[in-house]
Amino acid sequence: MKFTKIIILLFLFLSFKTFALSYSNDSISDDHRFQLKFKHIVVPSILIGYGIVGNESEILQDFNFHIKRKTTKYFNHSLTIDNYGQYAPAVAVYGLNAFGVKGKHNLSDRTVILASAYLIMGIAVNGMKYSFKIERPDGSSKNSFPSGHTATAFMTAEYLRQEYKDVSSWYGIAGYAVATSSGLFRIRNNKHWFTDIMAGAGVGILSTKLAYCINPWLSQKIFKNKKTNNSVTILPYYNGKQVGVGFAKSF
């Protein structure tokens, strides 16, 4: 049964890749085109693969327990910084733009990208949580794998990197530093295993890359994004149990 789950997840992963690639070659504008290539999926694939294999490997599970023992030995109280740090890179994108540092996309397009990434990430994370049903280190529930906080953190970190990599690579480095810290705090707070963090990071990165890949199609085929004064805003939300998006259009 567990082997079957792995095969299904790998199939879904490849399906997402094929879906994104098909639209990257569609007859749409070349403005801000992002073509998903093999090099883009290597790192997130390794991270997700490590997490999945780690659920079956005794060696990697022992490593999980080793990290848990080390962290709980020196830290006996939790911090809430990981609840806020996961969103910091996304906030930075809008903050930088507000202060005049222009990113790759306008407000409407980058909001659609963020919402798309959040939706892809939310579906993937919750699907994996309910499929694997891994118990959390503190025993509070059986939805540990993968880490949703970490997935969100790395999703927003890649979002920040994509928007500002042409301005300075340091924006992306800072975003990934914050995301890594958020993942480590999830381990420190005894909420996730190391394998949860690794898989969450991979899902988050891949979700953003897919969002950028399908954005030209979404903008022109769904939202009819043309040079007008119309403004489309899509904002994701997460209430602790459910993932969704809100939509608003001004004329």
Image (cartoon, grey):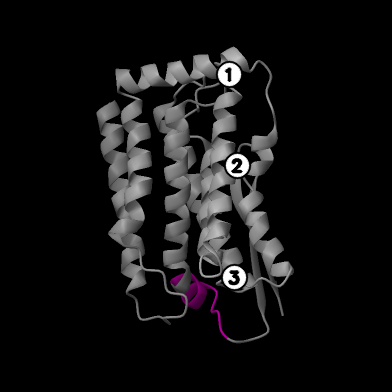
- Quadrant placement of the N terminus: top left
Determine the CA span between mark 1 and mark 2: 19 Å
* Residue type at tag 1: Ser
Q: Nearer the viewer, mark 1 or mark 2?
A: 1
Specify which label sits upstream in the sequence, 1 or 3.
3
Residue 100 locus on image (x, y percent): 71, 73
Determine the CA span between mark 1 and mark 3: 41 Å
Count up the numbered dots.
Answer: 3
Looking at the rendered structure, the secondary structure element under dot 3 is loop
Q: Is residue 162 above or below residue 128?
A: below
Q: Which mark is residue 103?
A: 3
Mark 1 is surrounded, within 10 Å at the Cα level, by few (under 14), some (14 to 19) or many (20 or more) other residues, namely few
Q: For the residues labelled 1 and 3, say whether their Cβ atoms are less than 8 Å apart.
A: no
Q: Nearer the viewer, mark 2 or mark 3?
A: 3
| Residue at 58% in and 25% down | 188
Q: Is residue 68 magenta?
A: no
Residue 51 locus on image (x, y percent): 38, 33
Q: Where does the magenta region start and end? A: 217-226
The residue where tag 2 is placed is 242
Relative to 98, 143 lies left or right: left
Q: Residue furthest right?
A: 99
* Residue type at tag 2: Gln
Mark 3 is surrounded, within 10 Å at the Cα level, by few (under 14), some (14 to 19) or many (20 or more) other residues, namely many
The residue where tag 1 is placed is 140
